[in-house]
Image (cartoon, rainbow, N blue to C red):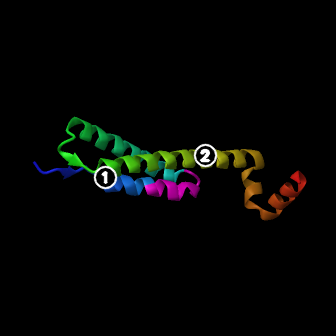
Amino acid sequence: MEQQKLPNATLIMVFGIISIVTCCCYGVLGLIFGVIALILANKAMKLHAENPDMYEGLSTVKTGRILAIIGIVLNVLYLLMCIWAISTFGWETLQDPQKMQELLEQYQ
């Protein structure tokens, strides 16, 4: 019997890469891509575990899954940093460069 490629293997890899690349978009966009890639990877790995002789491309799925996990961690850290900055300095201060410069000079 001919082996088939695991469904969404390439998509999982692409979403994993996108989740890392977009981690600086306030942590939201990359988090969405990372979670979707992780869900798709888990489904593909279950499908492969049920019938390993029928499917190929598990290494692509595993790589995409690892990239998605790294992307999720980076996005959560960046999101927490943004929340911390807004709660510490305030939204108005972050949008006004002169106020931000004065605040930074106080801390030096």
* Horizontal side of residue 86 vs 102, given as left or right: left
Q: Main secondary structure of the magenta part?
A: helix
Give the residue type that dot 1 points to.
Answer: Ala
**Which of the pair 68/26 is nearer the observer?**
68
**Residue 82 percent coordinates (x, y):** 66, 49
The quadrant holding residue 108 is bottom right
Q: For the view shown, which residue lies furthest in the top direction? A: 50
Label 1 vs label 2, nearer the camera: 1
Q: Which mark is residue 9?
A: 1
Q: Is residue 19 visible?
A: yes
- Is 18 within the magenta? yes
Badge 1: residue crowd in 10 Å (few <14, some 14–19, many ≥20): many
**Between discs 1 and 2, the one toward the N terminus:** 1
Q: Is residue 37 visible?
A: no
Q: Residue at the spot x=45%, y=50% of the render?
A: 67
Badge 2: residue crowd in 10 Å (few <14, some 14–19, many ≥20): some
**Residue 89 percent coordinates (x, y):** 77, 49
**Residue 16 percent coordinates (x, y):** 43, 53
Q: Dot 2 corresponds to which residue?
A: 77
In this picture, which residue range is highlighted in magenta? Answer: 17-27
